[in-house]
Image: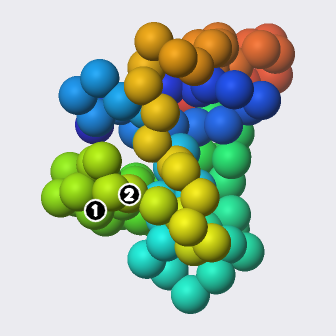
Amino acid sequence: MKLAVFGPQRVGLVVRDMVVDLQQAAAAHLSSEEEAEALVGHTFRSFVEGGEAALKTAGQALRLAQEDLEGLRGRRGEKIAFRIDGVKLLAPVTDSSKFKIM
Protein backbone atom coordinates (compact mmCIF):
# COMPACT_ATOMS: atom_id res chain seq x y z
CA MET A 1 0.00 0.00 0.00
CA LYS A 2 1.43 3.35 -1.07
CA LEU A 3 0.24 6.52 0.60
CA ALA A 4 0.64 10.15 -0.45
CA VAL A 5 -0.34 13.44 1.11
CA PHE A 6 -1.76 15.88 -1.43
CA GLY A 7 -3.90 18.95 -1.93
CA PRO A 8 -4.98 20.73 1.22
CA GLN A 9 -3.76 18.02 3.63
CA ARG A 10 -5.50 14.95 2.22
CA VAL A 11 -4.22 11.40 2.55
CA GLY A 12 -4.35 9.46 -0.67
CA LEU A 13 -3.81 5.93 -1.87
CA VAL A 14 -1.47 5.67 -4.84
CA VAL A 15 -2.98 3.31 -7.40
CA ARG A 16 -1.04 3.06 -10.66
CA ASP A 17 -0.72 6.68 -11.88
CA MET A 18 -3.57 7.99 -9.72
CA VAL A 19 -4.05 9.27 -6.18
CA VAL A 20 -7.34 8.31 -4.53
CA ASP A 21 -8.65 10.43 -1.66
CA LEU A 22 -8.59 7.87 1.16
CA GLN A 23 -11.29 9.42 3.32
CA GLN A 24 -13.67 9.83 0.39
CA ALA A 25 -13.00 6.29 -0.87
CA ALA A 26 -13.62 4.92 2.62
CA ALA A 27 -16.83 6.95 2.94
CA ALA A 28 -18.06 5.48 -0.35
CA HIS A 29 -18.37 2.04 1.24
CA LEU A 30 -19.05 2.99 4.87
CA SER A 31 -22.26 4.35 6.35
CA SER A 32 -21.13 7.99 6.45
CA GLU A 33 -18.36 10.50 5.89
CA GLU A 34 -18.20 10.95 9.66
CA GLU A 35 -17.43 7.23 10.09
CA ALA A 36 -14.67 7.50 7.48
CA GLU A 37 -13.22 10.54 9.23
CA ALA A 38 -13.23 8.66 12.54
CA LEU A 39 -11.51 5.61 11.02
CA VAL A 40 -8.92 7.12 8.64
CA GLY A 41 -9.00 10.86 9.25
CA HIS A 42 -7.93 13.23 6.52
CA THR A 43 -4.35 13.99 7.59
CA PHE A 44 -1.39 11.65 7.69
CA ARG A 45 -1.13 12.14 11.45
CA SER A 46 -4.76 11.14 12.03
CA PHE A 47 -4.31 8.15 9.71
CA VAL A 48 -1.29 6.87 11.66
CA GLU A 49 -3.03 7.51 14.96
CA GLY A 50 -5.96 5.42 13.67
CA GLY A 51 -3.74 2.34 13.92
CA GLU A 52 -4.98 -1.07 12.83
CA ALA A 53 -8.54 0.12 12.13
CA ALA A 54 -7.23 2.80 9.75
CA LEU A 55 -5.04 0.26 7.94
CA LYS A 56 -7.93 -2.19 7.58
CA THR A 57 -10.22 0.53 6.22
CA ALA A 58 -7.48 1.71 3.83
CA GLY A 59 -7.09 -1.86 2.58
CA GLN A 60 -10.81 -2.04 1.86
CA ALA A 61 -10.70 1.31 0.07
CA LEU A 62 -7.68 0.14 -1.95
CA ARG A 63 -9.53 -2.97 -3.13
CA LEU A 64 -12.50 -0.80 -4.12
CA ALA A 65 -10.22 1.57 -6.04
CA GLN A 66 -8.43 -1.25 -7.86
CA GLU A 67 -11.75 -2.71 -9.05
CA ASP A 68 -12.89 0.44 -10.87
CA LEU A 69 -10.33 3.23 -10.67
CA GLU A 70 -11.74 5.27 -13.56
CA GLY A 71 -15.33 5.03 -12.33
CA LEU A 72 -14.53 5.65 -8.66
CA ARG A 73 -16.76 8.35 -7.18
CA GLY A 74 -17.54 9.71 -3.73
CA ARG A 75 -20.85 9.46 -1.89
CA ARG A 76 -22.25 12.47 -3.80
CA GLY A 77 -20.86 11.38 -7.15
CA GLU A 78 -17.77 13.59 -6.95
CA LYS A 79 -14.44 12.62 -8.46
CA ILE A 80 -12.07 11.19 -5.84
CA ALA A 81 -9.29 9.75 -8.03
CA PHE A 82 -6.80 12.19 -9.53
CA ARG A 83 -3.82 11.81 -11.84
CA ILE A 84 -0.71 11.92 -9.68
CA ASP A 85 0.93 14.46 -11.98
CA GLY A 86 -2.07 16.75 -11.51
CA VAL A 87 -1.98 17.04 -7.71
CA LYS A 88 0.41 18.86 -5.43
CA LEU A 89 2.21 16.31 -3.29
CA LEU A 90 3.04 17.46 0.24
CA ALA A 91 5.30 16.34 3.07
CA PRO A 92 3.45 13.74 5.18
CA VAL A 93 4.28 15.44 8.48
CA THR A 94 5.08 19.12 8.81
CA ASP A 95 5.70 19.26 12.58
CA SER A 96 7.94 16.21 12.93
CA SER A 97 9.33 17.25 16.32
CA LYS A 98 5.96 16.33 17.80
CA PHE A 99 5.37 13.12 15.85
CA LYS A 100 6.84 9.70 16.58
CA ILE A 101 6.03 6.31 15.11
CA MET A 102 6.98 3.35 17.23
Residue occupying the point 49% across, 25% down: 4
Does residue 23 appear left or right of residue 17 in this picture?
right
Res 63 visible = yes
Q: Position of residue 3 (x, y in %)?
A: 43, 30
Q: Position of residue 42 (x, y in %)?
A: 68, 47
| Crowd rating for badge 1 (residues with CA inside 10 Å; few <14, some 14–19, many 20+) | some
User: Marks 2/1: CA distance?
Assistant: 8 Å
For disc 2, the marked residue is 72
Q: Quadrant of residue 60?
A: bottom left
Name the amino acid, label 1: Leu
Residue 8 higher or lower than 11, as above or below = above
Q: Position of residue 74 (x, y in %)?
A: 54, 64
SS class, disc 1: helix
Residue occupying the point 20% across, 51% down: 66
Q: Quadrant of residue 27?
A: bottom right
Does residue 51 appear left or right of residue 91 in this picture?
left
For disc 1, the marked residue is 64
Q: Are marks 2 and 1 in contact (CB under 8 Å)?
A: yes
